[in-house]
Image (cartoon, helix red, strand yellow):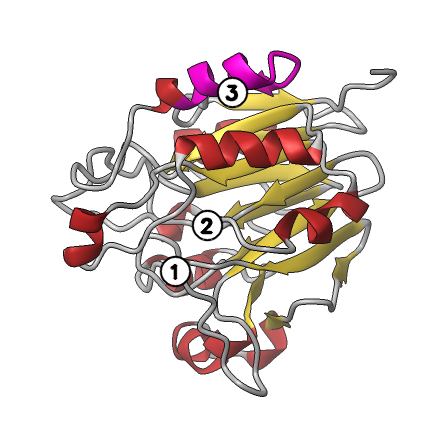
Amino acid sequence: MTSAGTNEVISRISGQQVPDGAAGLWWLGQSSLVIRMAGQTLYIDPYLAVAERRMVPPEFSGSDVTNADLVLVTHDHADHLDPEALPLIARASPQARFVVPRPLETRVLDLVPDAARIDLAEVGKPIRHDALEIIPVKAKHEEFDEVEGVGFPYLGYVLRDGSVSIYIAGDTIPYDGLVESLQPHAINLAILPINGRDYFRTKRGTIGNFHVREAAELALALGVDTVIPVHFGMFAGNTVPAGSFVDFLQSIAPQVHTHYPALFRPYIYMPVTGA
């Protein structure tokens, strides 16, 4: 891992102590996260573009990201695959590798023009980086849009290191087989989009995700001990009050903890044992 950069948030992330058997997480807004686990620093869907429509401005640019070991991209929408951020991160973190759905190979090579640094993710084919295992899971961003002979363009990822098992859903709605595909991985922590979908947003071309109730029901079905809701509070026309998710999950599964993420602040997750 590289030393911390000059940006204050990056320096705090790099300097945070994360105990063995735990994971450190930082929410950057929307579905963007930094996760430190298995001795590595992962950037998930880093959306760092400066844009007027953002309700939350970025705290740093891709050129500040000197500490990335892995960059995971779930799909090709600008708030997940940021075409400005990826080339800057690639230059600032020359050690970083990029994990992307196989159908995005050409797209990402235009931004990170080094095939040796890109891992093409396919459902059913785990990717290992030292002690970290990355398991791609198909996502249904209202549709699967599978590319025949290539794979699924929308993915989630399970991250496992022998102590912690984290499910990052990406953008998805429920589908038959999702619970069954995740249950063997003994998910401790689920990171789920909660912005939902509806007729009017669909008419405007906004593709949707889990409703609050669907995300809560998935967490209950998986038996996770903690959920972090994401994909809210970034765009005025595509957000929901995250407190409604917290309230609903509490009403159906009071044994499941909800971590309401605070922007750019550390959360140290330690799996519940003996429950």
CA neighbours of label 3 inside 10 A, class few (<14), some (14 to 19), many (20+):
many
The C terminus, quarter of image: top right
Seen at 62% across and 52% down, the residue is: 178
Horizontal placement of 204 versus 118: left or right?
Answer: left
Seen at 50% across and 76% down, the residue is: 146
Name the amino acid, label 2. Ile
Seen at 24% across and 36% down, the residue is: 57
Residue most extreme to the bottom: 149
Q: Secondary structure at mark 3?
A: helix
CA neighbours of label 2 inside 10 A, class few (<14), some (14 to 19), many (20+):
many
Please name whichever residue, 127 or 58, is drawn nearer the observer in this view of the structure.
127
Please name whichever residue, 208 or 126, is drawn nearer the observer in this view of the structure.
208
Q: Secondary structure at mark 1?
A: loop
Name the amino acid, label 3. Leu
In 3D space, how far apart are the residues under numbered discs 1 and 2 (Cα atoms)? 19 Å
Q: In this figure, which residue is indicated by the disc labeled 1?
A: 81
Work out whether mark 1 precedes mark 2 in sequence or the reverse, and give the earlier one: 1
